Amino acid sequence: MIAEARAGRTPNPDMMCNSRIKFGAFMDSVGHQFSCVASGHYARSALQGEEGYQHSDGGSDSRLWPAMTVAAGGGGGGSRARGVAPSPPARRGGKVLAATSSSSRAPDAEFRQSPQPQALLYCSEDEHKDQTYFLSQLSQSQLRQAVFPLGGMPKPHVRQLADRLRLPNRARKDSQGICFLGQLDYDQFLRGHLEESQGEVREFETGQLIGTHRGLWHHTVGQRRGVGPILHPRQVSRGPWYVVRKDTAANQLIVSREYQSTDKARNNFYADSINWIAGAPPAARGTAGTPLELRVKVRHGAAWHAAHVTLLDGGRRAHVQLEQRDKGLAPGQFAALYDGAVCLGSGVISEEGLYW
């Protein structure tokens, strides 16, 4: 994370925390003692071929059934949790019905030869709280051991349930910080590891020198936070100013007042070092080199992009062509790839071909 910030890119600490700490160091030191580890992330998972697997509606994790059944019907106050357990999967002739996707690209055929059940990561029921973007760097072994009990419930339901059960954290506000930093501010953390390196701030349209920054790592493409204080006093009132580019070679910060202009939006980029949750990219479909029609998230939230994704270097890289422009593509951030409701993985947005 520090190396990425030093290079002028915008790392995602939450992504790194999940893959390296919560599901990394924790799994390695403690998780191996248990069959599954439950997480409060808003996501859903399922083991393909296991009871409860339903592709079209996001997968019902069979590993949750025993625990949810106990919570719903067991003793010791279990009646208060009645209704929490999801409806059992549809059956016919004693078998679980594996509903197919509206697309013909259900992951089943791609993973049929796997010696172990493939763990698939699905979007949560609450699309506004969905956190699969932050989980898209997980490996197959990490996801296979993880379960997400909250993934099938909207956030208001979770709050109501916590209140009904009088959980001690029922009134706690949603977490906004970076878990492994505690109360330490992110910029303060980076400041303790990176030296400030002053450079020029120039206006995108004119090239005019309008200020001096204290380090490119302070700023993120698409944001205005922290720009005003580094501008010459007479330039501040011309704002608001937004970061549109970070020129690491020249150590220059490029800003603009006309951030909504179409010439500053981009609709294609390269994604590097792609992590495929399945362990490999999707099987080739159609003719060689034909782009995959996927959905893409370039940041956490409910917003999607329909995209054409062309795999490169055996799936280690990809060229992503968005159907609509996006004004906040930032090198170092992650682009998560989805086939319908299934999160396939993610890659790091590259600087290559990104700027005008």
Image: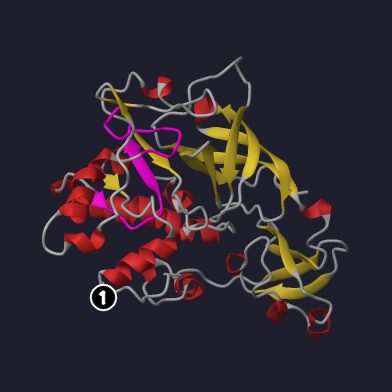
Tell me the SS state at disc 1: loop
Image x and y of residue 303, in percent: 61, 52
Name the outermost residue toward the bottom: 233
**Residue 134: in magenta span:** no
Which region of the structure is painted magenta?
37-59
Q: Is residue 233 above or below residue 38?
A: below
Does residue 30 appear in the picture of this structure? no
**Residue 44: in magenta span:** yes
Q: How many numbered tags mark residues here?
A: 1
Name the outermost residue toward the left: 75
Question: In this rendering, would 323 be left or right of 340?
Answer: right
Other residues around mark 1 within 10 Å, as few (<14) / some (14–19) / many (≥20): few
Q: What residue lies at 40% left-to-right and 41% top-to-bottom?
A: 121
Q: Amino acid at mark 1?
A: Pro
Q: Is residue 345 above or below residue 101?
A: below
Q: Which residue is mark 1?
A: 168
Q: What residue lies at 39% left-to-right and 77% top-to-bottom?
A: 183
Q: What residue lies at 69% left-to-right and 81% top-to-bottom?
A: 229
| Chief SS of the magenta region | loop
Image x and y of residue 297, in percent: 57, 47
Does residue 69 appear in the picture of this structure? yes
Image x and y of residue 336, in percent: 52, 44
